[in-house]
């Protein structure tokens, strides 16, 4: 991979977010040339700034990790959610098309309604609820429409040592509360952001190699799913977090964990009851395996605490 790394230059948008920070760490670890852009550096809709970066740096692909992810707040900020989740990806896709470079765009399980009984495959019917889900789906559509060289990576239940996420919230509440009620009738696959980062970079490397291949082989562009290897409820995820934190001595005592129904924890937007993602396609095309979340959460908990 060293030869591939040497002639790649990746532009990462959303660099200050949870996934963005994990991507920045991994790019540095692998020694891949890259440029980081956070919201403070540039707006992803600012094509003048981005065009200059792509041209000056010789960018070979863009990874878009920028997103508006406040699911409930999006209901009262629809224009901001649209600007980040729809308009931004559209602008990036048009930019990539002009420079004939790939766009790797991160999406979400919220494009589905959660009514399935089996893991979602990439071709399943989308039917989002709420502003967040709709803007993320429209962002996917914009990427597909404006850039033929695209990878759309849907993921779910993201956690890491960075940012705000369920794992960190549970660890904080465990120290503050003797008893906690956690939803037990919503199921998904926890996914470590560091593993998403590795998956995206591996895909970028393989696509770059395919683009450089003069034999005429086509890079397998399209929509892919990537998530954790085991489905669990939020209640089950919380139990696993507490058990590990207690095992390593970070929690002196585990709180009593009560299973509650979704109806007992009302939110502005309905969450998918079942958002397990099938990952056969990404394994077949890129050799990328699911995130082993139970294993990796141990390291994340140890680092965070």
Image (spheres, grey):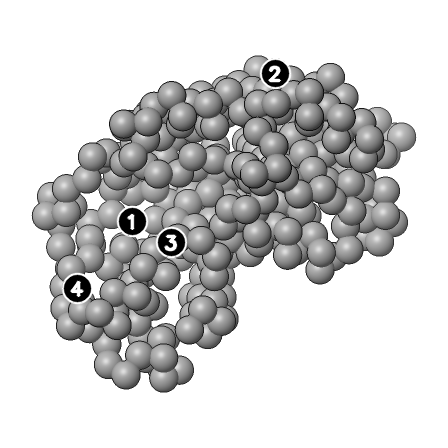
User: For the residues marked 4 and 3, what is the alpha-carbon distance in whole angstroms?
Assistant: 17 Å
> Can residue 195 be seen?
no
Q: Which quarter of the figure has residue 277? A: top left
Residue where numbered disc 2 is placed: 146
Residue where numbered disc 4 is placed: 180
Q: Earlier in the sequence, mark 3 or mark 2?
A: 2
User: For the residues marked 3 and 2, what is the alpha-carbon distance in whole angstroms?
Assistant: 32 Å
Kindly check if marks 1 and 2 are in contact, taking CB atoms under 8 A apart as contact.
no
Question: x%, y% of residue 250?
Answer: 36, 79
User: For the residues marked 1 and 2, what is the alpha-carbon distance in whole angstroms?
Assistant: 33 Å
Q: Quadrant of the C terminus?
A: bottom left
Q: Earlier in the sequence, mark 4 or mark 3?
A: 3
Q: Is residue 24 above or below residue 39?
A: below
Picture residue at 62% right of the left edge, 45% below the top: 200
In the image, is 135 to the left or to the right of 281?
A: left
In terms of depth relative to the viewer, which is nearer, 226 or 21? 21
Q: Which mark is residue 187?
A: 1
Q: Indicate the secondary structure of the residue bearing disc 3.
A: loop
In the image, is 120 to the left or to the right of 205?
A: left
In terms of depth relative to the viewer, which is nearer, 54 or 41? 41
Q: Indicate the secondary structure of the residue bearing disc 2.
A: helix
**Mark 2 or 4, which is nearer the eye?**
4
Question: x%, y% of residue 79?
Answer: 38, 21
Residue where numbered disc 3 is placed: 165
Q: Earlier in the sequence, mark 1 or mark 2?
A: 2
Q: Indicate the secondary structure of the residue bearing disc 1.
A: strand
Q: Is residue 172 above or below residue 109?
A: below
């Amino acid at each position: 991979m060293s030869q591939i790394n040497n002639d790649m230059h990746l532009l990462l948008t959303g660099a200050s977010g949870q996934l963005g920070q994990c991507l920045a760490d991994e790019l540095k670890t692998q020694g891949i040339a890259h440029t980081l852009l956070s919201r403070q550096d540039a707006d992803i809709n600012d094509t003048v700034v981005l065009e200059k970066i792509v041209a000056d740096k010789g960018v070979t692909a863009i990874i878009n990790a920028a997103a508006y992810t406040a699911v409930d707040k999006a209901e009262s900020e629809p224009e901001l959610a649209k600007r980040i989740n729809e308009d931004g990806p559209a602008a990036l896709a048009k930019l990539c098309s002009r420079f004939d470079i790939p766009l790797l765009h991160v999406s979400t399980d919220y494009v589905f309604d959660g009514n399935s009984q089996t893991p979602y495959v990439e071709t399943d019917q989308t039917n989002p609820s709420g502003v967040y889900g709709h803007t993320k789906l429209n962002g996917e559509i914009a990427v597909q429409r404006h850039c033929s060289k695209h990878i759309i990576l849907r993921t779910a239940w993201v956690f890491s040592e960075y940012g705000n996420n369920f794992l960190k919230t549970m660890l904080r509440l465990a120290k503050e509360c003797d008893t906690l009620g956690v939803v037990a009738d919503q199921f998904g696959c926890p996914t470590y952001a560091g593993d998403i980062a590795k998956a995206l970079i591996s895909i970028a490397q393989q696509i770059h190699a395919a683009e450089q291949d003069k034999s005429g082989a086509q890079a397998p562009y399209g929509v892919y799913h990537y998530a954790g290897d085991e489905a669990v409820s939020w209640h089950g995820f919380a139990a696993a977090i507490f058990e590990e934190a207690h095992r390593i001595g970070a929690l002196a005592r585990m709180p009593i964990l009560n299973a509650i129904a979704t109806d007992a924890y009302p939110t502005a937007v309905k969450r998918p009851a079942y958002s397990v993602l099938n990952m056969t396609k990404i394994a077949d095309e890129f050799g990328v395996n699911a995130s082993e979340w139970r294993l990796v959460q141990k390291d994340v908990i140890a680092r965070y605490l």
